[in-house]
Image: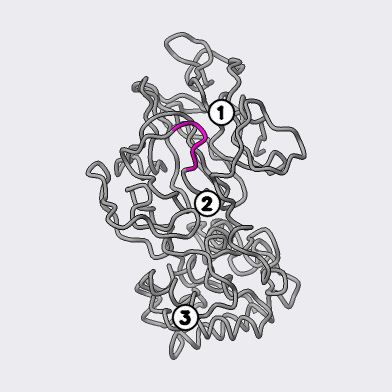
């Protein structure tokens, strides 16, 4: 049986307050009393950002997560655990699918047909418990039972890219989206989602503690499995031209640099981080996406002060900025989760943990009124890894 979602929910923007009201990198709520900075535009709470780590068999814990998210599925924790366990699937994965498809059924049209999973077309359920039962059994028999045990393989059938009922191309985001939410719940999105493989995965193993990341002043050695923050060693990166789109300072034509620059992801040396290395076609909107495993630790690339992004900047993919004393601005795309205390006005230093990546972290660099291609400076702190 092929699932053809009747609707897909575009990814809601994360709160512009740089994690005000969302879970932290270790699944804890921000400090009580934290206020939204005046510079940050208001935004509705995204139910998915309330996800936090929970054990696969903890029905009460799943209920607590769903209740915090304001989900109509709160109270169905036992159904998730019972039905998914019977199907041999990690219950947290079934929750993650509901998070991606309908924002845990907080999406209005899903409520009218009791369908938190986008099943269809036109599938209605007597209540959402029936939908949970159906989805868990369907995944167990027609996905995992057919050998589709990873999120990517499940997504290739559940939400096939290029499907005729997906003219907007939203299916291309399914694997990354479900992986992100599954990681927030404590699952390992790189491993099979069977309960046998995920039962022993703990929150600590899935979300590394940012404070434990050692700092090295040179590119890490291949094969080193430790999570590392890598600082630029001061050697100007090579650039292919004197324009900002090449990574040069347009005022001098030389390679643009920032003292003490750190690669924005703290990952093991042998972990994959992919990004393009060719010059930007348009320096006014040049941004580099760093593709990695979901929930990779995101760190401050430079010393400066955090600032919220405007509404237009958010639409362009910038979640927040680090503003340096010299006036450079390094823009980050929205994160999956934020470290405690990350909010507008916070001073940061290179390598300081900011939170966790969704799996695709966008980096933008502005100097004055112009935008500089960040790729040469990124490549100076981590060897280039072209996307294609």
Residue 103, percent from left and from top: 43, 67
Task: Report helix, strand or loop for mark 1.
Answer: helix
Secondary structure state at the residue bearing disc 3: loop
Could you tell me if the residues under marks 2 and 1 are in contact, i.e. CB atoms within 8 Å? no
x then y, percent, for residue 87: 66, 82
Classify 10 Å Cα crowding around label 2: few (below 14), some (14-19), many (20 and above): many
Q: Is residue 198 left or right of residue 299?
A: right
Q: Is residue 166 above or below residue 209?
A: below
Q: Residue furthest left?
A: 38
Q: Please identify, in this view, whether the residue under mark 2 or under mark 1 is nearer the observer.
A: 2
Q: Residue at x 38, y 70 (%)?
A: 68
In the image, farthest residue toward the top: 252
Q: Which residues are magenta?
A: 349-353
Number of numbered discs overlaid on the protein picture: 3
Decide which of 325, 370 is in the foreground and name it: 325
Q: Are marks 2 and 3 in contact (CB under 8 Å)?
A: no
Residue at numbered disc 1: 375
- Residue highlighted by disc 3: 122
Q: Is residue 187 above or below residue 63?
A: above
Q: Is residue 309 above or below residue 286?
A: below
In the rendered image, the quadrant that contains the C terminus is top right
Give the CA distance from mark 2 to mark 3.
31 Å
Secondary structure mostly taken by the magenta-highlighted segment of the chain: loop
Mark positioned earlier in the residue sequence (3 or 1): 3
Q: Position of residue 216 (x, y in %)?
A: 63, 30
- Residue marked by disc 2: 358
Residue 79 at x, y = what percent? Answer: 53, 85
At a point 58% along the width and 17% down the height, the residue shown is 234
Name the residue nearer the viewer: 298 or 360.
298
Real-space CA distance between mark 2 and mark 1, rounded to the nearest whole angstrom:
20 Å
Question: What whole-number distance in Å separates the C-alpha atoms at marks 3 and 1?
Answer: 46 Å
Which residue sits furthest bottom?
A: 126
């Amino acid at each position: 049986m092929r699932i053809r979602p009747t609707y897909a929910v575009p990814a809601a923007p994360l709160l512009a307050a740089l994690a005000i009201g969302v879970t932290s990198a270790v699944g804890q709520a921000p400090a009580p009393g934290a206020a939204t900075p005046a510079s940050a535009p208001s935004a509705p709470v995204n139910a998915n950002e309330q996800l936090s780590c929970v054990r696969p068999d903890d029905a009460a814990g799943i209920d607590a997560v769903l209740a915090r998210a304001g989900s109509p599925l709160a109270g169905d924790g036992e159904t998730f655990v019972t039905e998914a366990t019977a199907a041999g699937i990690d219950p947290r994965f079934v929750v993650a699918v509901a998070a991606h498809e309908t924002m845990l059924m907080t999406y209005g049209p899903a409520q009218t047909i009791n369908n938190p999973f986008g099943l269809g077309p036109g599938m209605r359920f007597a209540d959402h418990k029936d939908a949970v039962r159906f989805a868990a059994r369907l995944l167990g028999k027609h996905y995992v039972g057919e050998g589709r045990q990873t999120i990517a393989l499940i997504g290739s059938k559940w939400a096939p890219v290029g499907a005729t009922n997906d003219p907007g191309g939203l299916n291309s985001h399914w694997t990354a989206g479900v992986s992100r939410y599954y990681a927030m719940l404590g699952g390992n999105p790189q491993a099979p989602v069977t309960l046998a493989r995920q039962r022993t995965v703990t929150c600590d193993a899935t979300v590394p503690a940012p404070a434990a990341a050692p700092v090295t002043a040179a590119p890490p050695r291949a094969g080193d499995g430790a999570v590392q923050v890598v600082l630029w060693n001061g050697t100007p990166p090579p650039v292919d031209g004197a324009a900002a789109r090449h990574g040069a300072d347009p005022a001098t034509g030389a390679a643009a640099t920032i003292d003490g620059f750190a690669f924005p992801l703290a990952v093991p040396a042998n972990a994959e981080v992919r990004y393009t290395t060719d010059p930007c076609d348009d320096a006014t909107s040049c941004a580099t996406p760093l593709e990695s495993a979901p929930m990779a630790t995101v760190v401050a690339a430079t010393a400066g002060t955090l600032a919220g992004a405007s509404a237009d900047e958010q639409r362009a993919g910038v979640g927040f900025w680090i503003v340096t004393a010299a006036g450079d601005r390094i823009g980050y795309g929205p994160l999956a989760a934020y470290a405690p205390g990350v909010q507008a006005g916070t001073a940061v230093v290179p390598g300081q943990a900011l939170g966790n990546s969704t799996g695709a972290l966008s980096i933008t660099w502005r100097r004055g009124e112009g935008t500089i291609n960040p790729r040469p400076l990124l490549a100076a702190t981590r060897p280039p890894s072209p996307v294609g």
